[in-house]
Image: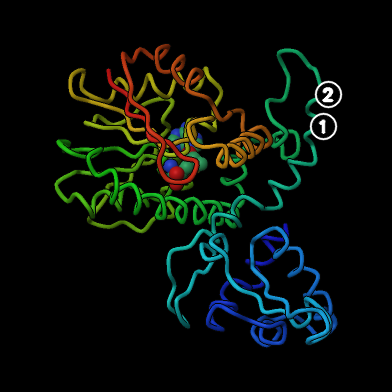
Amino acid sequence: MALECAINLGLPNAIHRCGGAATLPDLLNSIAVPESKKAHLPRLMRFLSTVGIFSVDVPAAGEHGNGEATGIYGLTPVSRLLVDEVGPNQPCASLSAFVVSQTTKYHVTAATHLSEWFKSDDGAAAVEMPFRMAHGTDLWGVMDRDQNMNQVFNDGMGSDTKFAMDFIISNYGDLFEGITSLVDVAGGTGSAARAIAKAFPHIKCSVLDLPNVIHTIPSDDVVEYVAGDMMRSIPPTDVVFLKYVLHDWNDEDCVKILTECKKAIPESGGKVIIVDIVVGSHSNAMLEAQVTFDLLMMVITSGKERDEHEWRKIFMDAGFSHYKTRPVLGFMAITELYT
Ligand SMILES: C[S@@+](CC[C@H](N)C(=O)[O-])C[C@H]1O[C@@H](n2cnc3c(N)ncnc32)[C@H](O)[C@@H]1O
């Protein structure tokens, strides 16, 4: 919540505007907090610099007096990813919107139900996730009834996807070689499909998502937007692309989704590209992020983060014959799935 607070107060942008190094008075001049709250900012900055979100250079004791009050705050590799403007009214790609989309009141309230959910045992009628216990429906149901949440979540996913796709297209462009059509299934507002269509204009790209998501997207000539349900039908295509979709669903639903994907692609030459977490696929430094995401999935969805063994079982149960998986940026992995 401190990270969300830093973003909503505009602290990463404020440090950036000061040339990457800002004192407390600089920050207070740059962000909107009333006089009565100004004395609390050093406490927030002390926490955020202690956990590595910002850096702080504190003059040696005795030189200028009291620690944080005279410190100079800077951006770290983490908070550089949160700067969302290069200049006034000049937005740039950042992960701020993604953080905000994962720390909504719906997420936080759901997390407070975790222990109650663990202790409840209603047999077959068991509520499958704390999110439903808190809100009476799943995340997609909440997005359908709350337009603001719909926008916050879609913007967040879009920012993460833009960031990831720039990297994937530059470094793993071979994924898209030799294909003429691609459907980004549960592709949100189409960031991935638009990035692929821009980099490979000969590929006909479409996005399939729920009506409440598709109806928010202005139409363009680049990508086709299709409102539908991936559990029921996926338009025919060379390649299905699935980013951060299967981890939202339990094994049975994943098999159902992948079975629809298999029906949509040709028996020979088709494939499914999955961008998701494979627990244990990276160094230990990434394991903490991967298992943190698994807890997020436990709270928010009926899904989970899976290790390679768990993924393999789902792939085989859906009737695929082989796959290739490789770790990529951060904690993500790319898996190509063949019929
Ligand atoms: C975690 S988001 C991922 C969005 C996108 N792939 C990305 O990474 O930016 C999951 C998406 O699944 C969509 N979704 C959920 N249930 C669906 C269904 N039955 N059919 C199609 N899309 C669905 C949601 O609307 C949401 O956009």
Amino acid type at circle 1 is Ser
| 140 vs 35: above or below | above
In the shown orientation, is residue 241 left or right of residue 249? left
Q: Is residue 159 visible?
A: yes
C-alpha span from label 2 to label 1: 6 Å
Residue name at image x 41 percent, y 48 percent: 214
> 10 Å neighbourhood of mark 1: few (<14), some, or many (≥20)?
few
| 235 vs 51: above or below | above
Name the image quarter holding residue 61: bottom right
Look at the numbered disc 1 and give the secondary structure of its residue.
helix
x, y (%) of residue 121? 80, 18
Name the image quarter holding residue 144: top right
Residue nearest the viewer, comparing 145 with 308: 308
Name the image quarter holding residue 25: bottom right
Residue nearest the viewer, comparing 182 with 122: 182
Kindly check if marks 2 and 1 are in contact, taking CB atoms under 8 A apart as contact: yes
- Residue identifier under label 1: 115
Amino acid type at circle 2 is Lys
In the shown orientation, is residue 138 left or right of residue 113? left
x, y (%) of residue 32? 69, 81
Q: Is residue 211 visible?
A: no
Residue name at image x 29 percent, y 47 percent: 171
Look at the numbered disc 2 and give the secondary structure of its residue.
helix
Quadrant housing the N terminus: bottom right
x, y (%) of residue 187? 40, 43
Residue name at image x 73 percent, y 20 percent: 126
In the shown orientation, is residue 329 left or right of residue 125? left
- Residue identifier under label 2: 119
